[in-house]
Amino acid sequence: MRLAKSEKAVSTVIATLLMINIAFTTGVLVFAWAQGLFGSWASTSGEYFQTKGESIEEDIALVNLRFLSPAPNVHTLNMTVRNIGHRDVQIASIYLNNTNVISQVSQSCKPWNNIGATVPMITSGPHAGTYLIASGDAVTFAFVIVTGLESELRNGGKLTVVVATQRGSRAVQQWETSG
């Protein structure tokens, strides 16, 4: 049996040119898609590294914790936070054993800095609800009543303290209170 020769086939030269055109067009489309994808990655990573660079320049340390119970139902906790970084920080939260207690900072004994000046809470703008600590300065926070922690602080126990800035820097310390 003999195969029939078709007169309607595409020549090998035209087929090769068509394949080159298809490959080139596909490459151009993939390149254009990748440029858009990599461009969005590049802009996102730029913001990420800028934020990381800013948070590297800020650093805080817990330098003192004092718990006093001068009377049976009166509890005082003073905590000193020092800014050891190169830029001013905004203290956004203070956690004692996983409880955010920044709202319990004593209103009668407002936080004070190294020279005894009062440090007010920022009440408006993007830093509302935070306390500013200048670079190289320290602020002592006073808590007259630490709700839910009285017995643990009075009777001895472990206290985990976490202070966090608005940019995400943290200082973490554990203290064992004496009974």
Image: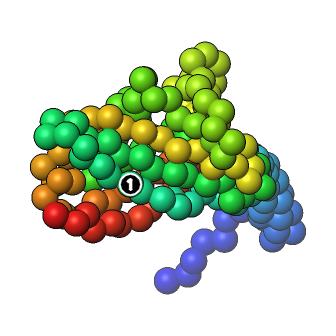
Q: Quick one: quadrant of the C terminus?
A: bottom left
* Image location of residue 163, percent across then percent down: 47, 50
Horizontal relation, residue 166 to residue 160: left or right: right
Q: Nearer the viewer, residue 64 or 149?
A: 64
Q: Nearer the viewer, residue 38 or 151?
A: 151
Image label count: 1
Q: Which residue is painted at 55% across and 41% down in the image? A: 91
Horizontal relation, residue 70 to residue 120: left or right: left
Q: Quadrant of residue 100?
A: top left
Q: Nearer the viewer, residue 23 or 40?
A: 40
The residue identified by callout 1 is 66
Specify the color scheme: rainbow
* Image location of residue 124, percent across then percent down: 61, 16
Most distant residue in the bottom direction:
1
Q: In the rendered image, is residue 45 in sight? A: no
* Image location of residue 16, percent across then percent down: 82, 68
Q: Which residue type does callout 1 highlight?
A: Arg
Where 134 falls versus 104 (above or below)?
Answer: below
Q: Which residue is painted at 35% across and 31% down in the image? A: 104
Alpha-carbon neighbours of circle 1 within 10 Å: few (<14), some, or many (≥20)?
few
Where 48 falls versus 128 (above or below)?
Answer: below
* Image location of residue 122, percent across then percent down: 60, 23
Q: Quadrant of residue 72?
A: top left
Most distant residue in the top direction:
124
Q: In the rendered image, is residue 72 in sight? A: yes
Q: Which residue is painted at 64% across and 19% down in the image? A: 125
Q: Which residue is painted at 32% across and 42% down in the image? A: 76
Q: Secondary structure under badge 1?
A: strand
